Each structure stands twice: as C-alpha cells, then as structure tokens.
Amino acid sequence: MNDLLRREHLFLRRPLNMTSRLLMLAATAAIVAAVFLPLWRIHLVAPQYREGLSLHIYSYQLVGGNKGQDLAEINNLNHYIGMKPLAQADFVEMTWLPFCFGIFALLALRAAALGRMLSLVDLGVAFTYFTLFSLGNFYYRLYYYGHNLDPRAPMTIEPFTPVMIGSQKIANFVQTSLPDSGGWFMAAFPILIIAAMWLSRKEEAVG
C-alpha cells in the first residue's frame, strides 16, 4: 500500500514537458471556441419541409436556421402536438454555461503555467463531472419537452423523448440530433488533456 501511495504521489508531482504545455494551450483555445460556436444541432425533415428546419444550440442561446425563422416555425409545429414552445428564457443554464467554459479555460492555462500532472488530473476530473451533468441535463430537457404534452392540442401523439444523438421518426417528421462544431471543440478538450498526460508520463518528479 505504501508503495502504491508513493508511486501515485510521484506521478502527481511529475512536471509537464513543453509539448504537453502546448497541448494545454490548444485545449484552452478549444474550450474558448466552444463558447462561440453551436454545441448541438437538431434538424427536422418532413414532406412539407423538404429542406428541413434546423435549431442550433449554443452555450448561451438558441438560434433557428434560415436567419432565425426556423425556431418560430418549430414552435408553431410544437403547438399542434401540445409541446411547450422553445424559449431561451426557460433555459437558465445558458446564463452560467459560458462562465463554466471560461473557468475551464483558466484552469487549462493554469495547468500549462504550473506544469504539474496534478493540475491535469484535477482539470480532467472536474471536466468529466461537468460533461456528465451537462449531458444529463440535456437529456432531461428532451424528456421534459416530449413528455409534458398538452392533452388539448389539435393533434394527439404518444409522449416521446427526442433522440439526443442520431435520428428518429416523430409523426411525419424525421428528427436528427448531432453535436455541432462547438460540441466537437468541447470533445477535443479532454482528449488534449489525456494526450498531455500521456506525453509527460515519464518525466522525473521534482520538488
């Protein structure tokens, strides 16, 4: 047990080499880019909407395709099945998500500056919890909107959960939901952390 604790202590004290520090600067740029780019994209296609309707989800706003007109059209369609309109004011997480991204950017810069394995481990664990919470919250949102349908709506359908990743048929629509450019930048963040840890795994512990 003492040997295990000693090895763990030495691992956490390992310094980061220059390549790992540069990777952490790249991770900072990636998480900052994710703030300004759409994280997720939902696309709806039907015979009467052959070009489709799209919704882009940012960390701080909802943006419909076709210069914003698609969001209004999606809400009109949601009214017919009794689904609550998509209103940005209801997504309170959009008021604090950009700040969380900013904190992770600062922590990545701190890891690059301090240059210790412990900083990467702390950052990786914190980002994992944040990601799991965010995905869980996203799924809950999808479930809530699809299972709280107004029974007085003009069209009655069975409660459903819009798919989070992939495609599914809802009435005469095909809904596709996939990560957007910001989501891929966000996914690159933990990959860069792991790469930085891997490249510095054999550095000699100091101090």
Image: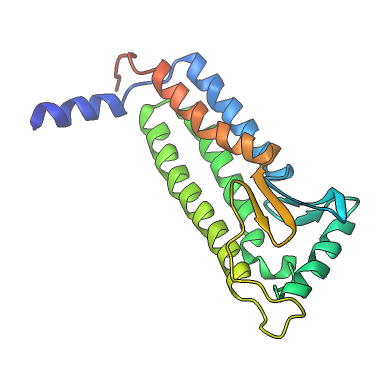
Residue 158: horizontal and vertical position, in percent?
Answer: 60, 71
Residue 31 drawn above or below residue 76: above
- Vertical placement of 157 versus 133: above or below? below
Q: Residue at x 44, y 27 (%)?
A: 194
Q: Position of residue 190 (x, y in %)?
A: 49, 33
Residue plotted at (60% across, 62% down): 142
Of 49 and 58, nearer the camera is: 49
Residue drawn at (66%, 54%) of the image: 169
- Find residue 152 and report its horizontal and vertical position in percent: 71, 86
* Quarter of the image where the N terminus is located: top left
The answer to which image quadrant residue 61 occupies is: bottom right
The residue lying toward the viewer, choosing from 137 and 160, is 160
* Residue 120, picture quadrant: top left
Q: Quadrant of the C terminus?
A: top left
Q: Residue furthest left?
A: 1
207 left or right, relative to 173: left
Residue 39 % position (x, y): 67, 45
Q: Nearer the viewer, residue 130 or 74?
A: 74
